[in-house]
Amino acid sequence: MEKTLVIFKPSAMERSLVGQILTRFQQKGLIIAGIKMIQLDEKILREHYAHLVDKSFFPLLLKSMMTSPVIVMCLEGKDAINVVRLMTGATNGREALPGTIRGDFASSNQENIIHASSCPEDAEAEIKRFFAPGEIFEWKPVNLNFVYSPLEMA
Ligand code: TYD
């Protein structure tokens, strides 16, 4: 089983979309390993978006991500990083496929509803960035045998 990090961005918070999106992840069978609401600041965003600090849109991205509190969530499941990225869709909401979260809820490159870790290295660093060890729970719902076969849970 693998863990990944999701952020409900201010665009999800302001548009009251958190419940609908959380429902999608739960319907898929992903396990909530950690969840909390925080206010992002410039320091943590410069770390989180280090690959984008030189882009012309970065100041606007920074401002947007600090507009409201956000909800950070750690999801667990088989191949969770890829599964959540597929469910998230392309960065630009106008290009994201219908059926994906961005495809269904976003019409913007910047105001694109959620962040999802892109690879195992990023997921590990991002979970550490936003959660203390005691905030991540190692638990399994009792119905997990109806989400995966025993082979898939190995
Ligand atoms: P990026 O890491 O490239 O995409 P993703 O979120 O799909 O992993 O970009 C991070 C965020 O930066 C993206 O979610 C929204 C913002 N962004 C813009 O505002 N404009 C842009 O042209 C790009 C590429 C990203």
Image: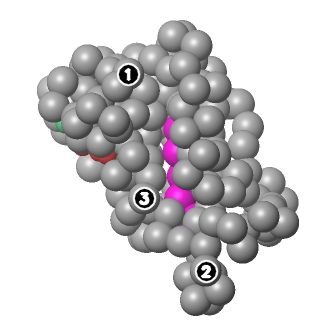
Where residue 38 sits, quadrant-wise, is top right
Q: Which residue is mark 2?
A: 149
Q: Is residue 119 above or below residue 110?
A: below
Q: Which one is nearer the viewer's eye here, 110 or 152?
A: 152
Image point 45% across, 34% down: which residue? 114
Q: Is residue 54 magenta?
A: no
Image point 64% across, 46% down: which residue? 26
Q: Mark 3 or mark 2, which is nearer to you?
A: 2
Position of the N terminus by quadrant: bottom right
Relative horizontal placement of residue 112, taking residue 144 as reference (left or right): left
Using the numbered discs, state the Cα–Cα distance from disc 1 to disc 2 in whole angstroms.
32 Å
Mark 3 or mark 2, earlier in chain: 3
Q: Which one is nearer the viewer's eye here, 153 or 145?
A: 145
Position of the C terminus by quadrant: bottom right
Q: How is the image coloured?
A: one colour
Q: Which one is nearer the viewer's eye here, 5 or 141?
A: 141
Q: Which residue is mark 3?
A: 83
Q: Which residues are magenta?
A: 2-7
Q: Is residue 143 above or below residue 40?
A: below
SS label for mark 1: helix
Using the numbered discs, state the Cα–Cα distance from disc 3 to disc 2 in whole angstroms.
17 Å
Majority secondary structure of magenta residues = strand
Quadrant of the rendered image holding ligand 1:
top left
Give the amino acid type for the residue marked by disc 2 in the picture. Ser
Relative horizontal placement of residue 141, taking residue 44 as reference (left or right): right
